[in-house]
Image (spheres, helix red, strand yellow):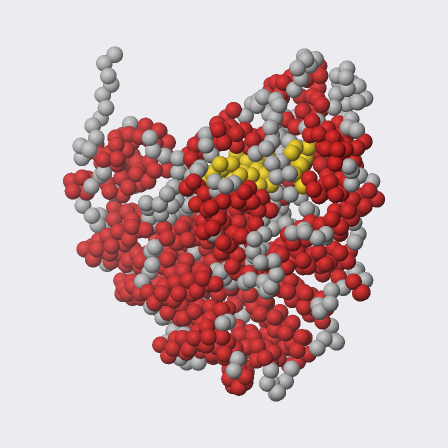
Amino acid sequence: MAQTFDTPFIGRADELARLTGVLERAAAGDPRAVLLAGDAGVGKTRMLTEAAAHAAATGTTVLTGHCVDLGDVGLPYLPFTEILGAAADDERLAPAFAGHPAVDRLLGRGSGSGPAPDPGSRLQLFEGVAGLLADLTVLAPLLLVIEDLHWADQSSRDLLRFLLSRGVLQRPAPGGPPHRLAVLASYRADDLHRRHPLRPLLAELVRLPAVDRLELRPLPDADVARLVRAQRTEPVPDSTVRHIVDRAEGNAFYAEELLAALPGDESPGSPAMPSGLADVLLIRIEQLTETAQQVLRTAAVAGRRVGHDLLRDAVQLPEEELESALREAVGRQLLLPGDDATYSFRHALTREAVYTDLLPGERVRLHGVFARLLAGAGRSEKNAAERAHHSRESHDLADALAASLEAADHAQRVRAPAEELRHLETALELWAVVDASALPEHSDTVTLTLRASAAAARAGEPHRAVQLTRSALARAGSDADSELAARVRYTLAGNLMRIDNLEAAFTYSSEALALIPAEPPSYTWVWAAATHVMAARYVGRDEDAERVARQALAIAERLRLADAQADLMISLVGLEAHNRRTAQGREQLLRARELARTAGNLPVEMRALYNLAIGCYEAGALDACLGWIADGLDRARRAGLLSSPYSLELRYLQSVLLYTLGRWDECTRAAAADAQLLTAAGGFTTAPALYVALARGEFDAAVAGARALIDGPADWMAALVASVVLTDAAALRGDAEECVRRMRASVERLVEGAGSERPDALVRLAALTLAAVADAAEEARLSGDAAGAARWAKIATELVELARSTAAHGEDGTRQGPEGLAWLARAEAEGVRAATGPDVEAWKRAVTASGYGEPYELARCQRRLAEALLTADRREEAAEQARAARSTAVLLGAVPLREALDALIRRGRLADAPAAGLIAALTARESDVLRLLGRGRTNRQIGEELFISGKTASVHVSNILAKLGAASRTEAVGIAYREGLIEPETSAPG
């Protein structure tokens, strides 16, 4: 970092120690990141400078990137472009770039013309940057400093999310070189309003184990006083110091500026002491020569940082005068020179004060100067974003439109769909006010709006995509060409299906189909028909869907539209008796996949792969399902389309399957990694990890996650997962009333969103609710509350009927597969329990049905079977079922289930008292923990004495309770004394 400070570093010793500790750990191969938060002027830059100096002094390579404020115009990947540019210029590091060609686009080395690459290859760019940084850490420890994250563009935020979650901060493969990397990133906490786009990213990042947050709070008054006195070589009067300390309120920058603005007599009561900080800053600036002020005003229009050449051309001063003015501004610590021939304002507040003080006409004129310079020959195309900003501010709307379109093209080339969308939206705003003679040729607002809609979809904003397509429809009007009008409508229908607005999707697909005739055959009609078939199926118009599908398939074959053929074949599989669950149906899907692959239509190929995977899942062929998921995700990964719609569905299915198969650690790891690449609209893909959290007893986290899904973008799958989690959580807490309320609200929400009276998920929700209802019914019977028992039994009957009717007919009119039948068997067994008590045969059927491959739900059914067998006095069989279920619960870490089984085993005396063999199974560490339990130590105290974390101590305590068959710590200690595992302690002689 080029920035230096003349004053000593005061205060912040603890904070600096934390940062240097992170740097030392990173240099030793433990990669870490720290998010440095604080209000403007509180000392973030100084802290980063000190940490960077420490890093450099210990042999660490330091690379710095800055985010800049360009209003509503983004400059994609700016801080990373700066970081990588500095690395490329370092002859020690430059050779590493050869192995990562994807990074070249950020450095301006890629092709600047020709067709835009697939936006999905954005992942390749991210992986290229991660791989490059990992390689750089092999050469030397590396520190990345990123300043002012609150101004970061979305693409930079996405890349930072990727790097911190699953890129360079991941542990290397066994035997691989360590990633000696630290990342320090600062942001203004006082700038983060409720809707600031950085807020959700920060919430995600601070949950990562390798990421810490460090907040710089205002300095104590004593440190501010020391800072003020350190600024001057001569003594500062105590009254002045007190006045500045009171005014600064712990902000180091305010204190420095207040002191610097004092007049010669340093009288705090002098009128020269301004009432606001902006006045303070401007007083300092007014002390410069007129030429230096002119340079500073011009630089303020450019932004926080400006290149020397650009500034020189803008101010149009002789070289000597410019250098003299810059030397003056640098000497007064208003501008800071950079190693890359740039000048930066020492603080953003300085730049803001100067910019705000410009006269309106002066501001417009200077923005116009920069716009013209940036449009000149030799300027990089990435400057289009800056040029668009300056052109708008200078009211040159025609150039702003042209520059916005150039910026959108650049954003598309570097795979920054969010920035592409923003530039396109800016262009659309400008289109209406730009003179017709200045509008671009070969373009129109309808086509441009459709492009913006596509960018929104790629950026993971399906709701915005719908809004834009609706806007395209409105712009098209009644005079639009029929084919264009049809294309807009079937595009809108497709976008509406992605947000589960199914009836509206069907309406628009019907309109699209009616706008153009089937004869003569046309590409547009075939795809309009293909979209209509999907929409019709979603709203239950199967006869309409099949009729149109067969007609369109014949025309697609005549036109040799192989990808349209494939899409229609996939739809027809869902309409036939040989659906995707059958071998015949999957054979058709394989043919469709091959047609789509031959035609080069990856989205249709992904649809075929998804249907192959989900068909296997529904048929209970879980291993085959995993194979198709892996095939589909590999195909998407190689094409750079891991965030495309059917890829998201495959990722969701993978999460569900990992949960179903009991591979819970894999499920949570995959969710944590995938979450960092997804927008809020794709959050449902990682949601099954909430099932794991709930089953492991992390109730608060699971419920909070489920509520976040409900509060997020409207999505049917997200609503489904949230409904399951919240319903099951209420059941596990034993709150039957809440469970029934949740169930009924969920049914209403899911039925409305599914376009079906019987979404398949209702069977599962009914079974989960029945567990709580049956508990309440049994409790009522035991307490003699006949009316209460009858009420709960009636509710149970209703829920069982709902489960049966759904399982029999379901969403598509066919009987459910193995998973649905397992939930149905469980619902019926719970219904019997609610009516008359535990029934052995009913629970045997549930256990048998659950044996298709879901160990956790099988164990939950085995627990209920054990209870039924115990009630029937079949103790040996009950003990066998309880032991099997407990083994599964321990293996999965399902603490609530294991505790329930332990209680059942104790209550039913299904196991002998702990025998020597079981007690001997205590590990050495568990024996140490047990000894400290005997002394009454808490988990935290145990951790401190054994040099382990309190969380690890808690895990050991849980294992000890399980092995001793104890319900509490006190009972465990009692068993341990009785069995001679620990000896009562005697007091030492006095």
Q: Is residue 265 visible?
A: yes
Q: Is residue 617 visible?
A: no
Q: Is residue 956 above or below residue 827?
A: above
| Spot occupied by residue 722 in the image (x, y as percentages of width and height) | 48, 56
Between residue 223 and residue 558, name the one nearer to us: 558
| Spot occupied by residue 857 in the image (x, y as percentages of width and height) | 34, 58
Say whether residue 8 is left or right of residue 308. left
Instruction: Name the quadrant of the N terminus.
Output: top right
Say whether residue 3 is left or right of residue 731. right
| Spot occupied by residue 816 in the image (x, y as percentages of width and height) | 39, 71
Between residue 780 and residue 599, name the one nearer to us: 599
Q: Is residue 458 above or below residue 71?
A: below
- The residue sitting at 62% across, 23% down in the picture is 6
Say whether residue 670 is left or right of residue 325. left
Residue at the extreme bottom: 519
| Spot occupied by residue 221 in the image (x, y as percentages of width and height) | 62, 21
- The residue sitting at 80% across, 46% down in the picture is 364
Instruction: Name the quadrant of the C terminus.
Output: top left
Q: Is residue 832 above or below residue 256?
A: below
- The residue sitting at 42% across, 62% down in the picture is 634
Q: How many marks?
A: 0
- The residue sitting at 23% across, 35% down in the picture is 924
